[in-house]
Amino acid sequence: MNQTMNKWFLSSALCVVPALSHADSFSETKTRAEAGDAVAQDALGTMYAHGDNVARDYDEALRWYKQAVAQGNASAQSHLGDLYRYGYGVEEDDREAVRWYQKSADQGYAEGQHKLGVMYSFGSGVDQDYSASLLWETKAAEQGHSEAQFNIGTMYHYGDGVEKDYVQAVHWYQQAAEQDHGPAQYNLASLYYAGQGVEQNATLAKQWLGKSCDNGFREACFTYRQLEEQGY
């Protein structure tokens, strides 16, 4: 069974939707933002960053995120970090990205904690530090952040900065997999198939592969068909 997948997952920039109803229109959000609502300012920045009901405009996204972070909004701090991480509307600057992720993480915001953990893992904008990465990813994972759970699973699966521990890998992959995280479902399937950290069970491996495939992880679809051909 193949295990040809990226070991670390950094959530796409600006993908977290602030806590506003999907029914909120652009004009309603802008009205709230102009009235000083930090959540709406963050949401408006994300609308501009995505081009959601308005032309994409990173300068406007930056402007509204800055207004939200001036009020200490943790989601906006994470989003501002994304702009610097990927160079959207500003010069790419990993150190500045880390600075904003840190502010967000320090407020207990799971997405900021996860992204800070990833930066420590890669040594982007900070000295590489797997212990710090594990610390921040764990804080996010304990809040139910599936990507953080997946990343911790990979650390234990492959022994990245920690002693290899298949039981811990299964534990964290399972948590992410139960949230329909396709890569985690695939990796969990590989451990069931190999009997690593869990009793060998090809039937469960196939079930998790099917779920991963349904969630769009193409390698899982290929491997699922291989197991079918082998009679599982």
Image: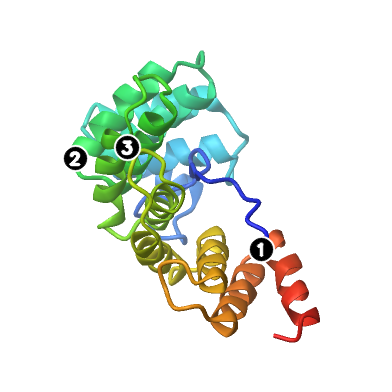
Pick the front one: 76 or 57: 76
C-alpha separation, residue under disc 3 versus residue under disc 2: 17 Å
Q: Quadrant of the N terminus?
A: bottom right
Question: Looking at the picture, which amino acid does disc 1 mark?
Answer: Gly
- Per the rendering, the mark at residue 216 is 1
Most distant residue in the right direction: 229
Question: Looking at the picture, which amino acid does disc 2 mark?
Answer: Gln
Residue density around tag 1, few if under 14, some if 14–19, many if 20 or more, within 10 Å = some
The vertical placement of 110 against 199, above or below, is above
Tell me the residue at 42%/73% (across/down). 198
C-alpha separation, residue under disc 1 versus residue under disc 2: 33 Å
- x and y percentages locating residue 101 in the rendered image: 32, 31
Q: Secondary structure at mark 1?
A: loop
Judge left or right: residue 185 versus residue 70: right
Tell me the residue at 21%/32% (across/down). 71
- x and y percentages locating residue 104 in the rendered image: 26, 36
First in sequence: mark 1 vs mark 2: 2
Pick the front one: 225 or 145: 225
C-alpha separation, residue under disc 3 versus residue under disc 1: 27 Å
First in sequence: mark 3 vs mark 2: 2
Q: Quadrant of the C terminus?
A: bottom right
Residue density around tag 3, few if under 14, some if 14–19, many if 20 or more, within 10 Å = many
Residue 36 visible, this angle:
no
Residue 187 visible, this angle:
yes
Question: Looking at the picture, which amino acid does disc 3 mark?
Answer: Ser
Tell me the residue at 47%/30% (across/down). 61
Question: Residue under circle 2?
Answer: 107
